[in-house]
Amino acid sequence: MPDCAADCCDEAEDGLFDDEIVNAIAAVRRENPDWFGRDDQIQVSAAEYTNAVAGQITKLYGLCARGGDKPGPPVGHSISEDEVAIKRDNRLSQNVDIIYGNGQAGIIRYFNCRPASF
């Protein structure tokens, strides 16, 4: 799917994939302990971290997932580098902000996208 950016996404109250995200974050922590510094702040780029989390979601659950990147070409990049986008099919995806402003990992807010944003 082409990225619909903000045109098809609205902020949501609830997460559709919270368990999957939490488990994927835990797997990234286990496999890359050096990525986390004092106070659990992420020590790699937001894009590297969110792509690793997306990769774990796909590996562990078989869901389509994409990490964040800067906006722009190539088509399909996320609108925010601190988000991971997840979908089961092309009807709906959820973009989830997974990095707090202070650089720590966690689930911040959700955006449901119809049709899927990617």
Image (spheres, helix red, strand yellow):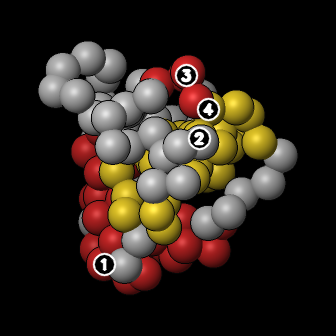
Residue highlighted by disc 2: 113
Residue 6: give its label: 3
Q: Report how far apart the C-alphas of labels 3 and 4 lie in the structure.
A: 5 Å
Whether the residues at callouts 3 and 4 have beta carbons within 8 Å, the answer is yes
Amino acid tagged 1: Lys
Q: Is residue 113 left or right of residue 44?
A: right
Query: Which quadrant would residue 20 be assigned to in this image?
Result: bottom right
- Examine the rendering and report whether any part of residue 105 can be seen: no
Q: Residues within 10 Å of mark 2 (few under 14, many from 20)?
A: many
Amino acid tagged 2: Cys
Q: Report how far apart the C-alphas of labels 4 and 1 lie in the structure.
A: 25 Å
Q: Residues within 10 Å of mark 3 (few under 14, many from 20)?
A: few
Q: Is residue 96 left or right of residue 81?
A: right
Dot 1: element: helix
Amino acid tagged 3: Ala
Whether the residues at callouts 4 and 2 have beta carbons within 8 Å, the answer is yes
Q: In this rendering, is residue 21 above or below 100?
A: below
* Residue depicted at x 29% and y 64%: 55
Q: Position of residue 79 (x, y in %)?
A: 42, 25
